[in-house]
Image (cartoon, rainbow, N blue to C red):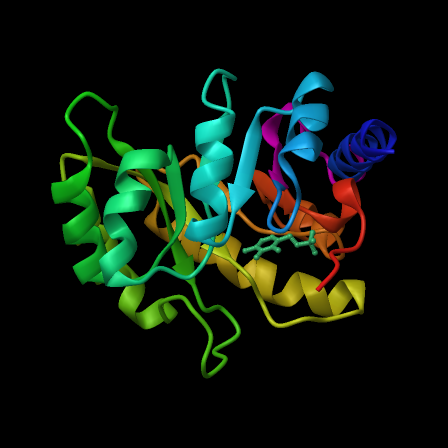
Amino acid sequence: MIAHALTIVKQNITDAARQFDRSPNSIQLLAVTKTRPIADIRIAFENGQTRFGENYLQEAIPKIKALCDYPLEWHFIGPLQSNKTKLVAEYFDWIQSLDKLKHAQRLNKQRPVHLAPLNVCIQVNISNETQKSGVMLSELPTLVEAVKAMPRLHLRGLMTLPAKRVDFNQQRIHFRAMYNAYQSLHSSFDTLSMGMTNDMRAAIAEGATMVRVGTGIFGERVK
Ligand SMILES: *Cc1c(COP(=O)(O)O)cnc(C)c1O
């Protein structure tokens, strides 16, 4: 089931890329494994998947430890609390949900010396939702400049999780705004992380370089 779903998701990425005149190789797939057992991650790995995303640290750390012999790349994509930054700095390769200067400073200090700098995407609240993680576009340049100056962080780009839209053309609007922000800032960026199971095609149409897919690969999450 997972193997088959993974094949279909990859095919959908390729099809969308071709449709919008992009190279399929310019879009990476992050498999989102929140609530999924370790066995599912192993199956995905055996079928060629190496990038995985987790939202909750108490769930993620045991999985990362159990799979430490596998050459996997772990992305933290969930909400961060100040007292948990150390765990992210020690266990993850990427954080895509950075949205506070204070957290950046802590991660920069806590990243262990024997590891490469922590890869970072700044999360943007592109649809201006109250209660939503991410910086507003107006606050973005200041945080970008601050993170760029931190030696133990490697700023790779931007991430967003826009308000849910069903209509394809509606979905494209916020993704286009993200692409414009990405273009206007990026001196050295290579990652625009946007698009999930239900809006991946619109994100690819608007320039996503990484899509984050959970349900599409592993099935519906049971609450
Ligand atoms: C859960 C989650 C995803 C994956 O969502 P699906 O709809 O299951 O593909 C992607 N990004 C973030 C930040 C998530 O929390």
Horizontal placement of 62 versus 36: left or right? left
Residue range corresponding to the magenta coloring = 18-31
Residue 56, given in percent of the width and then of the height, sits at: 47, 54
- Position of residue 100 relative to residue 205, above or below, is below
Name the quadrant containing residue 26: top right
Q: Quadrant of residue 211?
A: top right
Residue 183 visible within the image: no
Pick out the residue farthest to the bottom.
130
Residue sitting nearer the eye, 51 or 192 = 51
Pinpoint residue 132: horizontal percent, then vertical percent.
47, 74
In this rendering, is residue 11 above or below 126? above
Is 28 within the magenta?
A: yes
Q: Position of residue 94 (x, y in %)?
A: 39, 38
Q: Residue 116: which quarter of the image?
A: top left
Quadrant containing ligand 1: bottom right
In the visual, does 101 lie left or right of 67?
left
Inspect this view and state whether residue 50 appears. Answer: yes
Residue drawn at (45%, 69%) of the image: 125
Front residue of this view, candidates 1 and 95 = 1
Residue plotted at (58% across, 24% down): 50
